[in-house]
Amino acid sequence: MTRGAGDPWVAVARAGTAGDWLRAAERAYLHFGAALGQIAAEAHDEALYLLLHGLRLPLNAPASVLARPLTNVERQGLERVLRRRLLERVPAAYLTREAWLGGHRFHVDERVIIPRSYFVEMIPALLAELLPVPRPGRRMLDVCTGSGCLALLLAHGFPDAEVVGCDLSPAALEVAAINLRAHRLEARVSFCRSDVLTSVPPGPYDLILSNPPYEPSAHVDRQAPEFAAEPRLAHDGGADGLRVIRALIRQAASHLAAEGVLVIEVGGLRRAVEREFGSLAPRWLETADGSNCVVALQAERLRRAAAGRD
Ligand SMILES: C[S@@+](CC[C@H](N)C(=O)[O-])C[C@H]1O[C@@H](n2cnc3c(N)ncnc32)[C@H](O)[C@@H]1O
């Protein structure tokens, strides 16, 4: 691209300080229409993350770092990353190979979806309210574990619990294994390959949690490049989005403890879930942004429904 007036790369290349770079990068995000929502909802926040990561500064660095002058090497490195982000539409987390959730770092790459589940804000306090009285040796199962982030957050949040994570994708399980080693939780967390619950270690589980693929296939076909860069298996919930959710609800009863609970993030499918599974008395949990797209189902209801079907 030539560097004429209005070319966003001119300001990026001339940025004298970190703050100048941040302002120029933010304008470039808007100019190129990058899709957001994977690690941040606003261009400012994602550009700031790339800036701090590129300068090897902590994410909680004080605002005064924006006055810091950039060296030529730093400026060139930052521009290289920004070009990959905005011209090649590579998601920011695939560029930095990391995602931060609840104060913990997770390795991510193209083998897994970039974690952004509502469950992050619910572990452990909100989920603890759902569970029966704490007892040592609680067992938890994270279905559709991807990078393993939710299974590992469960283990951090419930220090007595034993946690299993499962996924259909062998590639995702390789990433989960990297995170398991990095978090040093091998004594309490394990991962396995399973199509929904068909091959998981025997229960009973006190909690089964899942952030499954729930986008209808037609939506997945039209995704912005950043989202299309993530594994399709992580998004595609079949024709109506409910394929994995339906299987999970049908299979959960025989894996849950008597007072166990199944919690599922269902995205925009709340009405569809209510229509199909209203008789299971779904309880919708509050999320920070009010979308309330996480549903809790009690083992007892699931068991009664399963018995009725037999
Ligand atoms: C939305 S991602 C969630 C990943 C992770 N739990 C998170 O919150 O970042 C859904 C995951 O479900 C997995 N998956 C898709 N179909 C599956 C199935 N039938 N059984 C088990 N896992 C499945 C995908 O490989 C993907 O890792």
Image (cartoon, rainbow, N blue to C red):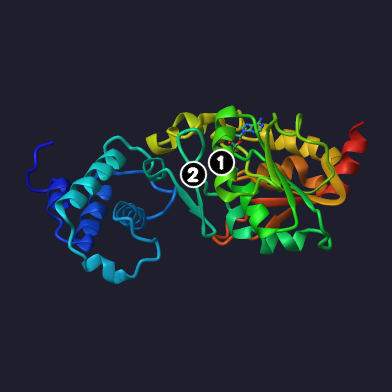
Q: Is residue 307 left or right of residue 235?
A: right
In which image quadrant can residue 302 be found? top right
Tell me the crowding category of disc 1: few under 14, some 14 to 19, or many 20 or more residues within 10 angstroms, Cα based. Answer: many
Which quadrant is the N terminus positioned in? top left
Decide if ligand 1 comes within 8 Å of the CB at mark 2: no
**View extreme (left): residue:** 4
Q: Is residue 71 left or right of residue 32?
A: left
Residue located at (72% from left, 47% from top):
163
SS at mark 2? loop
- Image spot of residue 121 (x, y percent): 59, 59
Residue 51 visible, this orientation = yes
Whether label 2 touches label 1, CB < 8 Å: yes
Q: Is residue 306 left or right of residue 139?
A: right
Give 6 or 39, whichever is nearer the viewer: 39
Which badge, 2 or 1, is on the more N-terminal residue? Answer: 2
Question: Label 1 belongs to which residue?
Answer: 147
Q: CA distance from mark 2 to mark 1?
A: 8 Å
- Image spot of residue 103 (x, y percent): 52, 60
Which quadrant is the C terminus positioned in? top right
Residue located at (48% from left, 53% from top):
100
Decide if ligand 1 comes within 8 Å of the CB at mark 1: yes
Question: Label 2 belongs to which residue?
Answer: 107
Q: Quadrant of ligand 1?
A: top right
- Image spot of residue 212 (x, y percent): 63, 39
Residue 142 visible, this orientation = no
